Every structure is written in structure tokens, then in C-alpha cells.
Image: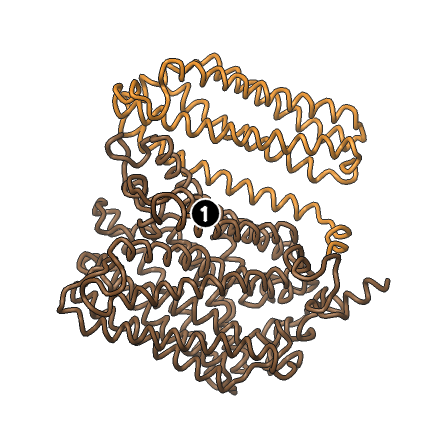
């Protein structure tokens, strides 16, 4: 059967498949957003106070980083369509660097919290009350799951870069690149919701 | 060219690919072979699950300890539930018959993503393996029931992590199957096959696929939260940390109720195919059948609260969920009426699959009506967590999906294997299966109504008589199932050769050889008529 799968190609089908997969990702986070809203509604004061402790500066920096990386990967799709392989590779390289920069920021941010003994299961956090436990529990779980998606996205884009170098993806066959772009935009989009929920709404 | 030609003529069973022996199966991306991989794995787990059920019924033959301790009984019903729900009935019809027949019934060569299709089988095997591992490692098997209710699921000493993660992986497998079918139906229908020329089994798979895709992620994230709760003590559902166990129930049933429709919709699709074929008459109200499939899938998302009538919800929520639950009965009833009307003035050919369809309608109606009793608020307070509920969902899940699965098995067996089966033994098996089924689950309605709670290995002496009948029913049912499976297996060897269209069916799968060639059709079919074109 391999004969058929290699000769048969339907770019629209693969893009449809990707969009459907993105629906499932949105619903995955959707469940967490529901949990977040329920607990925010029940502990407005604690969520309000705890949100003040997060660094809006790092959050904003990470938002800008992700937004730029989303635009660079979108530009690389255009570049490959215009047969400009070098530019496409450069733009993908920038995307990967920005993704890594996001994770580095996240590392320092989380490290700061953990140094102050604020992490799920810590006794210091437990003393501060249930609202704080829930806020930070959700914070670590949701941003952690998001960071996991960033890592998966980076691996995905890494493979795409290799495919472009090897000319397996070119101007006539770039559905995979587009799909990785779609995935990266989704990761970006989820962050756009996480950022205000944890850092801005105080 | 010669490769192409041989692929068009050789049957998928004889085709020699790159790999040999077992590898020609587990590395194959042919949807037909993957369907059979699923069939064998699902049947194996069905036998394991059924054996667990048999032992549980044996425990209940008398009050007090008969063959197992309370803890063992808890582990048994947990494993029985996880295996039967996540590994048998949810993948059941879509993964086996959907995989095998969907591309053929819409005139395609394969599904849209053959390699993802194989991946979803690997994930299925990985998921079930994790569940099985949870039984033999750690500090004893899980004992929460298949629902993993909080907060017990992160307080019990049982080995929950592999079981919960296994269910998560199985969900992922289900999502990929659904995604694959959706794209296949959207992109790969044969020329001329418009939406309303599509047979009802593919239609039911289409609705099912949407439910798989849009509901499963919710259980995925909920199970991840349970894992985080156990390992990191985050407090999502733990009241001592401010969490809310009721929220877990909401999230869990937001998936697990639509999952009931993942189980029953393809069953309804298969029954529609069987009834129209053996009545030799166009299905009555084709468009209403399609609409009711979609309506069931849609309304099914909004009724999850009826699992929680006694858990503590506002009055408004109770009334709303009760009303919506009653609404689901309408499209389901439309389907039953249309099946009956299809038979009216048809020239009915009494073959084994048709008997299965009749048995399906009978048990499905009992299951459906008992569902209405449970859906009404006052009755639910009395019946919640009794054997009445157990009887109800076994009539729907086992009676509905299970009967449809065996019906589909006898209907498409000649197509899949190229062999006919022994009708006499198939019918004997069916009779035993049916009688055993009613004897096993029928008394449970009475027992539940009288107040016998579910999930206990022990009961009061007043429930003894009903339980004896029920346990004896389980023996009859089990032997019926054994006869059916042995009969089908021996027919693989001794059965006579099946013609392309043994039943006089009109859908596309009957136009190609039995078993189908590797590429399904010698020439891509062009569709000009409706799916059930009888004179």
C-alpha cells in the first residue's frame, strides 16, 4: 500500500485534518479555562492578589516574542511559495530561536516562584490559603501544558527545517510547513488567552 | 504497470507487500487489514471483559463472599468497566467496521491518512497495555470504577496512574480515528456520491467522528488533571485544597455522555444497512434517518447532567437536563419507527443478520424506555446507583452496541473473509445469546427497583432469588457468545466461498469481490443513484 500513499497527495485534506486537530487542542485547553473560571468566580480576592505577584514584564515580553515568532513562520510560508528557500530557512531559524527564548524566560520565571517556595504541594503555599493554592496550581498546570506545546511545536518546526534543507518541502509541496505554521499559531493563540487570565486581570 | 494490475486483482488477504508474516499485518496501512487488527484486539478484550463480568455475576449468586473479597470485586468491576467502555464498545464499530467498510462504502481506495490510521491502532494497543499493566504493578489494581471519581481516585492506594494514562492514550487513538474518518468523508467520496447519496452507515460514522473529535479532548484534559492531582497535589478536585469534586463529575460526563453516542450511533447505522438489505426495500425516510443521526449527536452533548441528578445541582439545571434527556428520545424513536416502516411491505429474507437486527430493536427499546424512567427527576432519586441503572446501560451499551456489533459481524462476514458461515449454529448462538441476555439483565431492573445498590459484592437476603436467575442468565449468555465466536472461526476454514453479493445488498461494498481487492475496486465507481436503489 505504500505505493498509494506516496503517489496520492491531497493538500486540502491534510490541512483539513490539521484544522480538526486544532479544534481538539482548543477543547483540551477549553476544559482548563472552565476550571479556571469556576475557581476565579469562587475566589475572586485571592486570584486578584496572586495575579499581582506575577511579573507583567516577563509576561509581556513572552507575548511579544510569540507574536513575532508567529509572523516569522507565516512569512516563511510565503517565502517558500516564492521559491526563496534561503529566506524561508532563515525565518524558520528565527522562529525556533524565539520559541527557545520564550522557554528560557519561562524557566527563569518558574525558577523565581520555586525559589520562593511557591509550587503545587509546597507547605508555604498551603499556608496562604485555598485561593492561592488553586491560582498557582492552575498557573503551573496551564502554563506548563502550554510550554509542553511550545516544545512539541519546536520539534515539529525542527523537522520541517530539515525537510526544507533536503528539498522534501519546496514551492510545490509545502502543506506540511503550512500545518506546522497553523500549529504554531494555535500555541500563540492559547498564550494570548493565558496572558491576560494570569497576568493582566487583577 | 504489473504492480498496479496485481493490486487491483489480488484480494487484500493474499496481497504480498513489503513485509512478511505478522509484519504484513502490523505494518500494513491498508484500512482493511487495520480493521481486522482492531477486530482481533477488540474481540480479545471483549472475551477478557466478558469473563470478568461472568466471575462478578458468580460472586453475586449468593449473599456474602462466594469467590472473591470485596476489594477484589472492586478491582473486577473497575477493570471490567475500563476494558468494556474504553477498549471495546467505544472503538468497537467505528474502528472495526468503520475502518473496513467506510472507504469501500463511499467508493474510496483507503482512508485519508492511512499511516495515522495505523498509528491509532498502535495507540490503542499501547493504551490497553497500560491499563493491563496497572493491574499487576504498584500497590494493587485500581478500584475506583471506570469513572475515576474524585476525590477517591487520588486518595486510593490502588495503582491509578497507568490506568488513567491508559484511558488518556485510548482517547487519543479515538480522536485520530474520528479525524481520519471526517477528512475521508469530506474529501474522498467517489464521483457522484453527494452527501444525500451516501449510505447510512457512513453517515452514522460521520456524526460519530464529530463526537469523537469534539468530546474526547475534554476527558483527555480531565484525566491529565487527575494525574496532576495524584502526582503534584494541585487541588483541582480536592476539597481540602479548595477544589470541587462536583466539577470533576461535570467534566467527566461532558465527555462520557457523548461517548454513549459514539457507541450507539454506528450501531444504528449498521442496523439501518441490515434492515434495508434484508427487507429488499429502500430505507423508509432516508433524510429523516440522516437528520435524526445528526440530531442525536448534537443533543447528546447537552444531557450529561442526568448522570448527576443526586450529586447536587440547582433546580434549574436539573429541570433543563431532564428535559433535554427526554428530547434525545425523539430522534431515537424516529429511527425505530423508520426501521419498522422499512420492513412494511418489504420482501423480508430471514437471515441471521436480520434476526440480530430484530433482537437489537427489542433490547434497544427496553433500554431506551428504562432511560426515560431514569431521566425523570423523581424516579431518578429512587433509582440512582441501584442495579436498575446497571440494567439500563447494559441494555443500551451491550444490548444496543453489542447486538449491532454481532449483527454487523454476521452481515459483513462474507465480505470481509470471503467465506459464508454456518447459519444453523449462528442462529443457535443468537438464541442463547438473546435468552441469556434477557435472563441476565432483566431481573436487574426488578432488583434495582427494590433497592439493591450497585457496586457491592454483597447484598441482603431479600435480593437472593433475582440474583440467582441473573447469574444463570450470565452462563447462557456466555455460552451463546462462545458458540457464535467458535462458529465464525470454524467457518473461516470450512465455510463455502462467498459470492460478491450474498444478501442482495445495494451499497457499494457488495459491488466488489469478496474479499475485496487491495485497492477495493477494479475501477473507481461513479455514483448516479441513491444508496438503496430497490425497485
* Label 1 secondary element: helix
Residue A195 horizontal side relative to residue A37, left or right = right
Q: Which chain is brown?
A: B
Residue B272 horizontal side relative to residue B145, left or right = right
Choose between A42 and B237: the one closer to the eye: B237
Choose between B372 and B250: the one closer to the eye: B250
Q: Position of residue A148 (x, y in %)?
A: 52, 30
Q: Position of residue B6 (x, y in %)?
A: 80, 67
> Quadrant location of the C terminus of chain B?
bottom right
Q: Which chain is orange?
A: A
Q: Is residue B525 visible?
A: no
Residue under the point 59% across and 23% down: A99
In this rendering, the answer to whether A97 lies above or below B21 is: above
Q: Position of residue A123 (x, y in %)?
A: 29, 21
> Quadrant location of the N terminus of chain B?
bottom right
| Quadrant of res B530 | bottom right
Residue under the point 40% across and 17% down: A114
How many marks on residues? 1
In this rendering, the answer to whether B483 lies above or below A57 is: below
Residue B486 horizontal side relative to residue A201, left or right = right
Residue under the point 36% across and 73% down: B363
In this rendering, the answer to whether B487 lies above or below A71 is: below
Task: Specify the subunit that label 1 lies on.
Answer: B
Residue under pointer 1 = B166
Residue B295 horizontal side relative to residue B14, left or right = left
Choose between B515 and A30: the one closer to the eye: B515
| Quadrant of res B251 | top left
Q: Position of residue A200 (x, y in %)?
A: 41, 19
Q: Is residue A92 visible?
A: yes
Q: How is the image coloured?
A: by chain
Taking the view exactly as shown, the residue that stands out farthest to the right is B1
Amino acid at each position: 500500500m505504500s505505493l498509494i500513499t506516496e503517489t496520492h497527495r491531497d493538500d486540502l485534506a491534510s490541512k483539513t485534518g490539521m484544522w480538526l486537530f486544532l479544534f481538539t487542542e482548543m477543547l483540551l485547553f477549553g476544559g482548563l479555562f472552565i476550571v479556571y473560571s469556576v475557581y476565579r468566580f469562587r475566589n475572586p480576592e485571592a486570584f486578584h492578589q496572586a495575579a499581582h505577584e506575577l511579573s507583567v514584564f516577563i509576561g509581556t515580553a513572552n507575548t511579544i516574542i510569540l507574536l513575532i515568532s508567529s509572523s516569522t513562520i507565516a512569512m516563511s510560508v510565503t517565502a517558500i511559495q516564492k521559491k526563496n528557500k534561503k529566506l524561508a530557512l532563515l525565518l524558520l531559524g528565527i522562529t525556533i530561536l524565539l520559541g527557545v527564548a520564550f522557554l528560557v524566560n519561562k524557566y527563569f520565571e518558574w525558577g523565581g516562584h520555586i525559589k520562593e517556595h511557591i509550587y503545587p504541594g509546597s507547605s508555604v503555599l498551603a499556608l496562604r490559603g485555598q485561593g492561592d493554592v488553586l491560582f498557582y496550581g492552575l498557573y503551573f498546570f496551564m502554563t506548563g501544558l502550554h510550554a509542553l506545546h511550545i516544545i512539541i511545536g519546536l520539534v515539529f518546526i525542527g523537522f520541517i527545517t530539515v525537510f526544507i534543507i533536503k528539498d522534501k518541502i519546496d514551492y510545490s509541496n509545502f502543506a506540511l510547513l503550512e500545518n506546522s505554521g497553523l500549529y504554531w499559531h494555535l500555541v500563540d493563540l492559547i498564550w494570548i488567552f493565558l496572558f491576560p487570565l494570569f497576568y493582566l486581570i487583577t | 504497470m504489473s504492480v498496479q494490475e496485481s493490486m487491483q486483482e489480488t484480494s487484500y488477504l493474499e496481497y504480498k507487500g513489503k513485509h512478511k508474516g505478522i509484519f504484513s499485518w502490523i505494518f500494513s496501512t491498508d484500512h482493511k487489514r487495520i480493521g481486522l487488527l482492531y477486530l482481533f484486539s477488540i474481540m480479545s478484550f471483549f472475551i477478557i471483559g466478558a469473563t470478568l463480568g461472568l466471575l462478578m455475576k458468580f460472586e453475586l449468586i449468593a449473599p456474602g463472599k462466594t469467590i472473591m473479597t470485596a476489594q477484589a470485586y472492586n478491582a473486577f468491576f473497575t477493570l471490567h468497566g475500563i476494558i468494556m467502555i474504553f477498549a471495546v464498545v467505544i472503538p468497537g464499530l467505528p474502528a472495526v467496521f468503520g475502518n473496513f467498510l467506510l472507504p469501500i462504502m463511499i467508493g474510496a481506495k483507503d482512508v485519508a491518512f492511512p499511516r495515522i490510521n495505523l498509528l491509532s491502532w498502535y495507540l490503542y494497543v499501547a493504551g490497553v497495555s497500560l491499563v493491563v499493566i496497572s493491574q499487576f504493578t504498584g500497590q494493587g489494581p485500581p478500584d475506583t470504577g471506570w469513572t475515576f471519581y474524585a476525590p477517591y481516585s487520588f486518595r486510593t492506594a490502588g495503582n491509578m496512574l497507568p490506568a488513567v494514562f491508559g484511558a488518556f492514550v485510548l482517547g487519543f487513538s479515538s480522536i485520530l480515528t474520528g479525524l481520519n474518518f471526517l477528512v475521508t468523508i469530506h474529501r474522498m467520496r467517489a464521483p457522484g456520491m453527494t452527501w444525500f447519496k451516501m449510505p447510512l452507515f457512513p453517515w452514522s460514522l460521520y456524526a460519530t467522528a464529530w463526537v469523537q473529535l469534539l468530546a474526547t479532548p475534554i476527558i483527555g484534559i480531565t484525566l491529565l488533571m487527575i494525574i496532576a492531582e495524584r502526582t503534584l497535589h494541585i487541588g483541582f478536585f480536592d476539597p481540602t485544597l479548595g477544589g470541587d469534586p462536583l466539577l470533576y463529575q461535570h467534566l467527566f460526563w461532558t465527555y462520557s455522555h457523548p461517548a454513549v453516542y459514539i457507541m450507539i450511533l454506528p450501531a444504528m447505522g449498521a442496523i439501518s444497512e441490515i434492515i434495508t438489505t434484508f427487507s429488499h426495500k429502500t430505507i423508509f425516510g432516508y433524510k429523516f434517518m440522516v437528520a435524526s443521526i445528526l440530531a442525536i449527536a448534537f443533543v447528546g452533548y447537552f444531557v450529561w447532567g442526568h448522570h448527576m441528578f443526586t450529586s447536587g445541582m440547582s433546580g434549574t439545571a436539573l429541570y433543563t437536563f431532564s428535559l433535554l434527556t427526554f428530547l434525545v428520545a425523539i430522534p431515537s424513536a424516529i429511527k425505530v419507527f423508520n426501521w419498522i416502516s422499512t420492513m412494511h411491505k418489504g420482501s423480508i429474507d430471514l437471515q441471521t443478520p436480520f434476526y440480530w437486527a430484530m433482537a437489537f430493536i427489542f433490547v434497544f427499546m427496553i433500554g431506551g424506555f428504562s432511560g426515560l424512567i431514569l431521566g425523570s427527576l423523581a424516579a431518578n432519586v429512587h433509582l440512582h446507583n441501584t442495579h436498575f441503572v446497571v440494567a439500563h446501560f447494559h441494555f443500551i451499551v451491550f444490548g444496543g452496541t453489542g447486538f449491532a456489533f454481532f449483527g454487523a459481524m454476521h452481515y459483513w462476514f462474507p465480505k470481509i473473509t470471503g467465506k459464508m458461515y454456518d447459519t444453523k449454529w449462528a442462529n443457535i448462538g443468537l438464541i442463547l445469546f438473546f435468552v441469556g441476555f434477557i435472563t441476565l439483565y432483566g431481573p436487574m431492573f426488578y432488583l434495582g427497583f427494590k433497592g439493591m445498590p450497585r457496586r457491592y459484592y454483597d447484598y441482603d437476603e431479600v435480593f437472593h432469588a433475582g440474583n440467582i436467575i441473573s447469574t444463570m442468565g450470565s452462563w447462557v449468555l456466555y455460552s451463546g457468545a462462545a458458540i457464535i465466536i467458535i462458529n465464525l472461526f470454524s467457518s473461516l476454514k470450512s465455510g463455502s466461498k462467498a459470492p460478491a453479493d450474498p444478501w442482495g445488498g445495494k451499497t457499494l461494498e457488495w459491488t466488489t469481490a469478496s474479499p475485496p481487492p487491495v485497492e477495493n475496486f477494479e475501477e473507481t465507481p461513479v455514483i448516479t443513484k441513491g444508496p438503496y436503489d430497490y425497485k
